[in-house]
Image: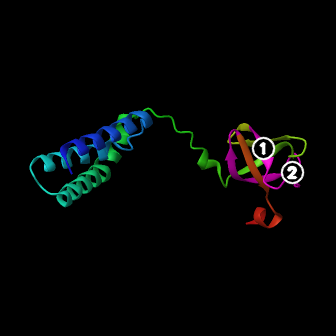
Amino acid sequence: MTVLIWLIIMIIFLIAEAVTVGLATIWFAAGALAAMGVCALGFGTFAQFVVFFIVSMVLLIFTRPFAIKYINPNKIRTNYEDVVDKTVKITGRVDNINGTGTAVLNGQEWTARSKREDEILEEGELARVVEVTGVKLIVVKISPEERES
């Protein structure tokens, strides 16, 4: 391959990085730069691809975790995944057909919907969160057996 081809590949990866802004392709742009250097030194296509792959993978594996941690340290995490499998108390009748339902989780009231369309949960019942969709808790009724364990 020629230096110009590696330059074009590097520019494509840099443009993709600028568009995504997620540290996704910068490592491959650096790999293309290294391969371009190897090409300029007169090494063959196989050596260029090996250098491209090795440099890209080493940078991806060893520098990406560091970069993600320190480039955007103030990123707010919602941790909504943490509420899955939590027990909630139903505070307003959960009825998907009528579009009603609320539940309290960690002292905050959430909109709640049943996982099963035909299941209605009454105020005061306990339910388990199975997923979060937007700002709604998707819940299933806790069976008597689950309450005892």
**Visual colour scheme:** rainbow
**Position in image of residue 28 (x %, y %):** 30, 47
Q: How many marks?
A: 2
Q: Nearer the viewer, residue 131 or 127?
A: 131
Upstream in sequence: badge 2 or badge 1: 1
Seen as rendered, the residue at the extreme left is: 41
**Position in image of residue 53 (x %, y %):** 26, 56
Q: Indicate whether residue 111 is drawn in magenta.
A: yes
Give me the C-alpha separation between circle 2 and circle 1: 10 Å
Q: Amino acid at mark 1?
A: Ala
Q: Nearer the viewer, residue 113 or 103?
A: 113
Any mark on residue 112, and which? 1
Direction from residue 81 to residue 97 in the image, left or right? right
**Residue drawn at the location 77% of the way across and 61% of the way down:** 147
Q: Secondary structure at mark 1?
A: strand
Look at the image and tell me in which quarter the C terminus lies: bottom right
Few, some or many C-alpha atoms within 10 Å of disc 2 (few <14, some 14-19, many ≥20)?
Answer: many
Few, some or many C-alpha atoms within 10 Å of disc 1 (few <14, some 14-19, many ≥20)?
Answer: many
Any mark on residue 34, and which? none
**Residue drawn at the location 85% of the way across and 53% of the way down:** 117
**Position in image of residue 33 (x %, y %):** 21, 43
Direction from residue 124 to residue 134 in the image, left or right? left
Q: Indicate whether residue 126 is drawn in magenta.
A: yes
Q: Amino acid at mark 2?
A: Leu
**Residue drawn at the location 56% of the way across and 43% of the way down:** 79
Q: Secondary structure at mark 2?
A: loop
Q: Which residues are magenta?
A: 110-135
Pointer 2 with pointer 1, Cβ within 8 A: yes
Q: Nearer the viewer, residue 7 or 142?
A: 7
Residue that mark 2 sits on: 121
**Residue drawn at the location 89% of the way across and 45% of the way down:** 97
- In the depicted structure, whether residue 116 falls above or below residue 95: below
